[in-house]
Every structure is written in structure tokens, then in C-alpha cells.
Amino acid sequence: MALKDLVAKKSEIAESVIEGVVSKYVRYYTDTLEIGFTPDGAALSGEKRVLVYLVAILGWRYVTNEPTTIPTKPADLEKAVGIPGGSLRPLLKSLKDSHLIAPSGDGYSVREGNLEAITAAIAGEKKPARRKIAIAAAPKVKGDSKAARRSTGNPISSNIDAWIKDGFFKSPRTLHAVHHRLHEHGVIARQTSVSGPLLKAVQQRRMKRQKIMEGGKEIWAYCVAGA
């Protein structure tokens, strides 16, 4: 192997690491410029939730080309991550003392150079006990049960699994193309909800992703690992 084979763009590495950290825990809402937590994200411990949120803010540049500034002062974070100020400030101090976050002009932020340490901190923490989340519960449907809901699975993941088998991913497919096909099959979801299942398939080595040119710029595309 030559040294040139080890060359990679720093931006591509950062985007991949950020996606690996946040894909399970947050969703980007580009219409309102907000970051929302998934149920898994809402169940994280306080420190872990703050880290995921700040990493997600770092990833805004890869989600939209529009300049995006999200304030992260304690009052802003209190509302965004759902932690009361009296509990939040000690968490911020602890994370700052651990050099995982740093004060910035708009509050607090994480540096790209800390992403590896932050990833390890998030992965290494035991999952806390599930707590009640202040969100509206879905209305109960007759015959609904936990077992029934488990049997249906994730419609995005199940469709991607089926398309891997039927050859749809023999050619590289962009996130937009996969999102469009889901809509064709009646699965209505935000485009940002599709990246998580695709990334999981890549991490499981069932698929790979590569940069292709589309519309005059490089974007990620997904295909089966042997293609």
C-alpha cells in the first residue's frame, strides 16, 4: 500500500464521524432550523445528550448550504436538550473540565479535533434507565401492543434491506434517490430519517458508500459492498 492510498479529505472524515455520532439520536429540521431528539436521543443521560446536540450543531454545514448559527448559551441549551438550568450548568462545567466542550462566542461548542474523544465518551457510557419524556403520546389503536409494533419493524430499514436483496443498490444510489423511492412505496419520511438506516447498513458491511458527482458537486452514494 502506498502512502497516497491513505490520503483522505479532512471534511469527509469529519462528516462521517459526525454522522456516526448523531444519526441514531437526532433529526435535522431544515425548515425551522431546529435539531430534535429521537426517542433514543431523549433517553440519553444529560451529559451525553449535551454532547450529541453540540456535535449535531457542528454537522449543520453538511446538511444545508445556508449559513446556520444556533446559539448554545446555557439558557439556549436548557430549552434544546430539556435539562433544567440548575442541573445543566454543573454538566457543562464537567464537560468543559474534561476538555470535551469549550466556551465560544455563542455559548458552548465542540471542536472537530475532539470528535474521537467525544465518540468514545458517548459509546462508553452505560445506557441510563428509560425515563418519561415530555412528548405527546400516540393515540392507542385497538389491537395495538408492544409485540405487534415490534413485528412491524422500521419501514425504512425493512425497505432498504429488501432493496439490497433485489439489486436496487447494485448501482450507487444517493440519499435523495433512496428517499424518493421510499415515497414511491408509500413510506413518507423526512430525508434526514433515511441516513441512519443507510449508515447502519454500511457499518454492518452490507453496503458501502462512495463519493459521486451529481449536479456539479460531490455527494455520498450507497451501493452493495461487492459492487
Image: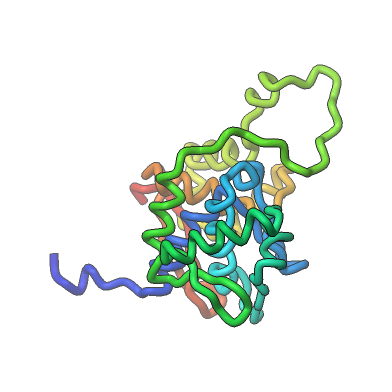
Q: Where is residue 86, by image quadrant?
A: bottom right
Quarter of the image where the N terminus is located: bottom left
Q: Is residue 65 above or below residue 209?
A: below
Q: Is residue 194 above or below residue 63?
A: above
Q: What's the residue at 66%, 42% (across, down)?
A: 39
Position in image of residue 166 (x %, y %): 50, 39
Residue 56 appears left or right of 81: left
Residue 20 in view in this figure: yes
- Image spot of residue 113 (x, y percent): 38, 71
Which residue lies most toward the left here?
1
- In this view, the residue in front, 115 or 162, is 115
Foreground pick, 114 / 68:
114
Q: Is residue 191 visible?
A: no
Task: Report the side of 83 relative to 225 (left or right).
Answer: right
- Residue at horizontal 49 percent and vertical 67 percent from the top: 101
Question: Does residue 110 appear to the left or right of 43 in the view shown?
Answer: left
**Which percent across, then down, holds residue 172?**
46, 57
Image spot of residue 140 (x, y percent): 84, 27
